[in-house]
Image (cartoon, rainbow, N blue to C red):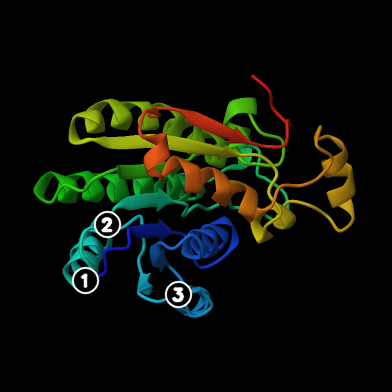
């Protein structure tokens, strides 16, 4: 098996996840790209530089699929060195969020199943696997959102709630995983130019949105990927339990 470090990226079929996979592949990592949409995931992997990459159809909200995928992946390619939990969902209706009073339980549950349960299942599978087969410089990166920190503007209450849960979960996981030598850090993206963001905007609103960002532009997936590249590197070995804002100054602490 290759000595190059293996990174599992969930939600890698498009958007930020695809950007993270491409960025890390350029840095020399082997990428295991997982997504609910197997065809999109395969296309992403086909375009990655280098070799040793793979794609996996995985529903992060399914305990069985997550556990089975982890087992199959590690049997084929060796232990996963780093896990990036980029899979996420934002449900909109004609580009608009539902008010709380109009939100169905099914919509609420589905959003949390993907964004919150999915993160739990994937990270649980990772720490279980690393308990049996430790790796040097084990890394986990979770995804929250600027919307969770601000209460959101375009995002639904279900999305905000699901991403707020990740704020606390990341710290809990970091404390528990430290004894295994695994660092756990989160990313809180701001307005990143992806299909998900554009679903929440009408044509031409991009410039107005960018005007509210101190750096004067929407973020790009590469902006997120660069931060993740550092967090999973050996150089970040003394950083854990943090939430990194990548938002162009949209929210400053």
Label 1 Cα crowd, 10 Å radius (few <14 / some 14-19 / many 20+): few
Q: How far from the left and from the top, in percent, is residue 8?
A: 36, 59
Q: Is residue 167 above or below residue 108?
A: above
Would residue 202 be found to the left or right of residue 86 on screen?
Answer: right
* Residue 107 % position (x, y): 51, 49
Q: Residue furthest left?
A: 132
Q: Which label belongs to residue 1?
A: 1
Of the pair 17 and 103, the residue shown nearer to us: 17
Task: Where is residue 67? Give x, y as percent.
Answer: 21, 59
Pick whichever of labels 3 and 1 is earlier in the sequence. Answer: 1
Q: Is residue 216 left or right of residue 42?
A: right
Q: Earlier in the sequence, mark 2 or mark 1?
A: 1
Mark 2 lies on residue: 80
Secondary structure beneath label 2: loop
Residue 116 seen: no
Quadrant housing residue 244: top right
**In this rendering, which labeled residue sits more in front, label 3 or label 2?**
3
Figure quadrant of the N terminus = bottom left
Q: Is residue 183 found left or right of 108 in the rendered image? A: left
Residue 106: image location, x then y, percent? 46, 50
Can the viewer see residue 198 in this picture? Answer: yes
Quarter residue 178 falls in: top left
How crowded pointer 2 is (Cα within 10 Å; few <14, some 14-19, many 20+) is rated as many
Residues under numbered marks 3 and 2 in contact, where contact means CB atoms less than 8 Å apart: no
User: Image height check: is 195 above or below 172?
Assistant: below
Residue at image position (44%, 63%) is: 28
């Amino acid at each position: 098996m290759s000595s190059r470090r293996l990174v599992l990226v969930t939600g890698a079929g498009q958007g930020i996840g695809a950007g993270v996979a491409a960025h890390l592949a350029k840095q020399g990592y082997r990428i295991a790209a997982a997504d609910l949409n197997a065809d999109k995931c395969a296309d992403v992997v086909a375009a990655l530089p280098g070799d040793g990459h793979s794609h996996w159809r995985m529903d992060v909200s399914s305990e069985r699929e997550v556990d089975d995928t982890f087992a199959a992946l590690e049997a084929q390619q060796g232990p996963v060195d780093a896990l990036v939990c980029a899979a996420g969902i934002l449900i909109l209706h004609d580009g608009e969020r539902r008010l709380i009073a109009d939100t169905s339980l099914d919509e609420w549950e589905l959003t949390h199943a993907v964004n919150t349960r999915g993160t739990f299942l994937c990270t649980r599978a990772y720490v279980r696997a690393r308990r049996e087969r430790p790796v040097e410089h084990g890394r986990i990166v979770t995804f929250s959102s600027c919307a969770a920190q601000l209460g959101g503007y375009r995002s639904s209450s279900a999305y905000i709630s699901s991403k707020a849960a990740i704020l606390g979960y990341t710290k809990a996981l970091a404390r528990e995983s430290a004894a295994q030598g695994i660092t756990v850090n989160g990313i809180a993206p701001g307005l990143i130019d992806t299909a998900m963001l554009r679903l929440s905007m009408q044509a031409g609103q991009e410039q107005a949105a960018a005007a509210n960002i101190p750096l004067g532009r929407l973020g790009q997936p590469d902006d997120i990927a660069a931060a993740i590249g550092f967090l999973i590197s050996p150089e970040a070995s003394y950083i854990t339990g943090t939430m990194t804002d990548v938002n162009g100054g949209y929210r400053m602490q």
